[in-house]
Image: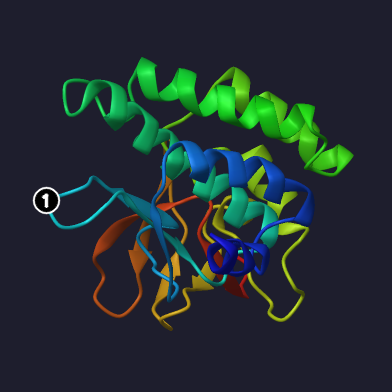
Amino acid sequence: MKEFLIQLGNHIPQSALPILKTWVERHPFWLKVTNARNTKLGDYRSPTKKLPHRISVNHNLNQYSFLITLTHEYAHLLVFEEFKNRVDPHGKEWKMCYASLLTELVSNSVFPHDLSQAVQNHIKKIPASSSADMELNRELKKYNQATDNFIHLVDLEKGDIFCLKNNRVFVKGEKRRTRFLCLEKKSQKQYLIHGAAEVILVSNH
């Protein structure tokens, strides 16, 4: 447990450690801090005959993003403990559990004031992915280290040309719920890209 908390303490606010300690004591799990993944911030895997509950979180998240992602995945663990696979992954059971965990963090003043308000708004209408909550995303990004020129796709204008981290160049198009239909310049194919994606502006339309 000591080594686990030391590992955890490198990635989350120190004020959250006592709360996470009680979570882990109630329902132990393996935590894997992974390389950055473009498709997800974290994931949960249910136990097998040989392995316990497992949660992974991307290493490049700031301490508050890491904590919220870990909370998201821990909620999956709790729902599995009670319901196994009998309910939807992001159904009402998971939303209630996730909201309760976030409320515990907020009530213990784990988040700074501006971020705390965004988390409280997030609790009122929880999406399947925290990255779909643009308000929360913007507040979380304030705590990233300022080491790059990335901005969120949602903040660009229609017709702006932008580049992804993999150097593919696109033209921003129409909005489709939380994603935008964008045209890749090289292939002339259209792709749906999430509004929270971090991009570099190449030129304005």
Q: Residue at 41% of width from left, 81% of height from top?
A: 166
Residue indicated by mark 1 = 49
Residue toward you, 195 or 171: 195
The reply, left or right, for residue 193 in relation to residue 118 is: left
What residue occupies the far left of the structure in this picture?
49
Task: Give the x, y percent position of residue 130.
Answer: 52, 41
Q: Nearer the viewer, residue 87 or 22?
A: 22
Give the total number of marks visible in the rendering: 1
Q: Residue at x 47, y 18 (%)?
A: 96
Q: Is residue 130 visible?
A: no
| Front position in the image: 30 or 129 | 30
Please report the residue visible at 43 percent of the width from the left and 83 percent of the height from the top.
167
Q: Nearer the viewer, residue 58 or 27?
A: 27
Q: Residue 89: horizontal and vertical position, in percent?
A: 28, 31
List x then y, in percent, for residue 103: 66, 25
- Above or below, 65 against 124 in this view is below
Q: Is residue 68 visible?
A: yes
Q: Quadrant of residue 201?
A: bottom right
In this rendering, the answer to whether 150 lies above or below 147 is above
Q: Residue furthest right?
A: 113
Taking the spot 33% from the left edge, 21% from the top edge, the residue there is 91
Q: Quadrant of the C terminus?
A: bottom right
> Which quadrant would residue 82 be assigned to in this image?
top left
Mark 1 lies on a secondary structure that is: loop
The figure's colour scheme reads: rainbow
In the displayed structure image, the side of residue 138 where residue 70 appears, left or right: left
How many neighbours does mark 1 have within 10 angstroms: few (below 14), some (14-19), or many (20 or more)? few
- Position of 127 compared to 99: left or right? left
Residue 117 sits in quarter: top right
Rendered view: 114 above or below 45: above
Amino acid type assigned to the residue bearing label 1 in the image: Lys
Q: Position of residue 39 (x, y in %)?
A: 35, 60
